[in-house]
Amino acid sequence: MKKSFIVTIVFLLIMGISLFTACNGSDKKSGKTGLEKRVSTYHDAVYVGANENFNVSFVTGEAEKIIVIDGEVGEMTPFATLTVTPLSSSLFNNTYTYLLQGETGERSGNLAKDVIGASFSAEVADTKAIGKIVSVKVIAEGIMESEISLTNKAEGALSWREILSVAERELAEVIRAESDTGNLNREIYIKLVNALADADQPYYYYVSFIKSSSDYWALLLDPVTGEVISKKI
């Protein structure tokens, strides 16, 4: 069961990332040290919620501007991605806007249908300024408004830096074997995920050290304790 979970996560991540083009190997001067400089994607908040109309996620963190599985870390940029998935086929034909409500402010904008047509999404600017996210209202003007409360699955969990330290200890032997000069030629993904994209299913940290789509080490970790649930090297 655990093995199939990590295989599912790897497959979904590879399928999503392969939609992007290649990146270069430049590093952003961000004050990161050690393995932190090899991190090309991390999550620092994962808000989720649902009602009878929509599943919603709002994920923030930092990632490469142009993403590919190539073992290199390109130019990094913050992201804050709102994704809305209709739960009824009748809701896919509407045009939507959103109102994202934080404790100290709000953000609004348009939702765009993704390339597959299975969900709607938006990149939301300057979300740190509105504090902890409380809810999102999905609006099809003149047709419907649907408000969804959001819960941060990263709250109470280890930070991405802390979970990276856990992964570094767990993979110390293979890291040493591959790092002849102290530099590891792999990029690292740190994501807080669940297998079914369902808020009621348990979330885990997925940490992967990637050289290519076929050459990677992966860990599935308990987000609170750091316990290793599954491992692939």
Image: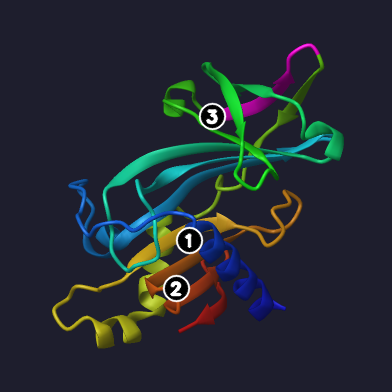
Are the residues flagged by discs 3 and 2 in contact, CB closer than 8 Å?
no
Identity of the residue drawn at 63% across and 27% down: 134
Residue density around tag 1, few if under 14, some if 14–19, many if 20 or more, within 10 Å:
few
| Residue neighbourhood size for the residue with mark 3, other residues' Cα within 10 Å, grouped as few (<14), some (14–19), many (≥20) | some
Task: Evaluate if marks 3 and 1 touch, with contact meaning CB atoms under 8 Å apart.
Answer: no
- Dot 2: element: loop
- Residues at badges 2 and 1 in contact (C-beta under 8 Å)? yes
Query: Is residue 134 located in the magenta-colored stretch of the structure?
Result: yes
Amino acid type of the residue tagged 2 in the rendering: Ser
| Tag 1 secondary structure | loop
Give the quarter of the figure containing the N terminus. bottom right
Q: Quadrant of the C terminus?
A: bottom left
Q: Nearer the viewer, residue 228 or 126?
A: 126
Q: Residue at x 20, y 54 (%)?
A: 27
**Residue 112 drawn at (x, y percent):** 60, 32
Q: Circle 1 sits on which residue?
A: 18
Residue at screen point 44% across, 69% down: 208
Query: Which residue sits furthest top?
Result: 142
Q: Which residue is mark 2?
A: 213
Residue farthest to the left, as pictured:
181
Q: Amino acid at mark 3?
A: Lys
Report the disc number at residue 162: none
The magenta segment is 132-142
